[in-house]
Image (spheres, grey):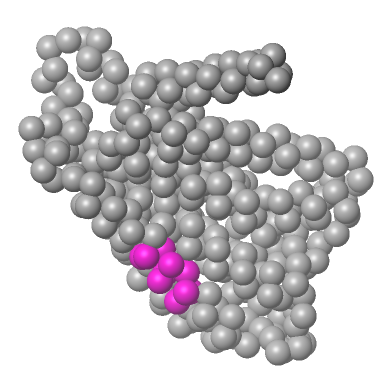
Amino acid sequence: MSNSSSITQFLLLTFADTRELQLLHFWLFLGIYLAALLGNGLIFTTIACDHHLHIPMYFFLLNLSVLDLGSITTVVPKAMANSLWNSRAISYTGCVAQVFLFIFLFAAEYYLLTVMSYDRYIAICKPLHYGTLLGSRACVHMAAAAWGAGFLNALLHTANTFSLPLCQGNAVEQFFCEIPQILKLSCSQSYLREVGLLVVSLIVTFVCFVFIVVSYVQIFRAVLRIPSEQGRHKAFSMCLPHLAVVSLFVSAAMFTYLKPPSSSSSSLDLVVTLLYAVVPPALNPLIYSMRNTEIKHAVWKLITGSFSEAVKSPSSA
């Protein structure tokens, strides 16, 4: 039996026992991480540099890219380092920081996705009011509210989770510090306060999800009235992937945070966690941005312009 005050580190879940599989997981995570860095970094740079993209939709996409970069950086590099160095350890402070940052960025991203569904609803269903309802000040306020709500959420959950006495050792059955896995280490019945807070947060999450679904239902109804088949196809191709990613995001997170502690195997927990913690940051650049013609043209212009400058610099010197 151990007490939380005597715990100086936690032991994370290893992906495999053999060295070859550990290295395979390292290279797999490295590929995913680099893809997320490249995609989100390119989108962030493109939107920041191209003044034609300084409109509400792309402002929210820029925020989404920053949140994706932060969330995947919070969990993946540590897992890569542990696989590479055949280690399981993470310091107590590092675990607290990982929980706080992940919940902060994860919650802020979800609230931002809710705001983005409202943006799409106004753009498609009420285009004449778009400039009035989504001015620059309103966009900044909505983005700030998403970030602020995520920060408050993370602060409450982190403080509550790590104030619980831990009596079940220090082995976390996940590849990063996750609240449900930390709660498994707490003393009997002492985790009910955090469970109550998680339920409240998930109710808010469900309300946001209902708002997103209703927004997209209204969008689809408006799209079906578009006389052009090409216009309908374009709208559906943009909205359906968004809704699919949000559904995956919410269902995987709810499964992780609502299920009883011993109702599933660690392998299933691992797969579900990958679906909401690692996959969305890597896929969001493709789903939300690279399917957009304006973004693709702006990215190409940025790349070709940078290449031209690089070619001219040596010759001019």
Q: Quadrant of the C terminus?
A: top right
Return the x and y of residue 25 as percentages of the image width and height. 78, 42
Q: Is residue 13 left or right of residue 217?
A: right
Residue closer to the observer: 202 or 154 = 154
Which residue is rendered at x = 81% and y = 55% of the image? 82
Magenta-highlighted residues = 148-157
* The one of 92 and 258 positioned closer to us in this rendering: 92
Q: Residue at x 18, y 45 (%)?
A: 135
Of residues 309 and 97, which is closer to you in this image?
309
The reply to whether residue 272 is visible in this rendering is no
In this rendering, is residue 119 above or below 105?
A: above
Tell me if residue 245 is in the magenta stretch. Answer: no
Q: Residue furthest left?
A: 128
Q: Is residue 159 above or below residue 28?
A: below
Horizontal arrangement in the rendering, residue 123 relative to residue 110 (left or right): left
Q: Quadrant of the N terminus?
A: bottom right
Residue 102 visible here? yes
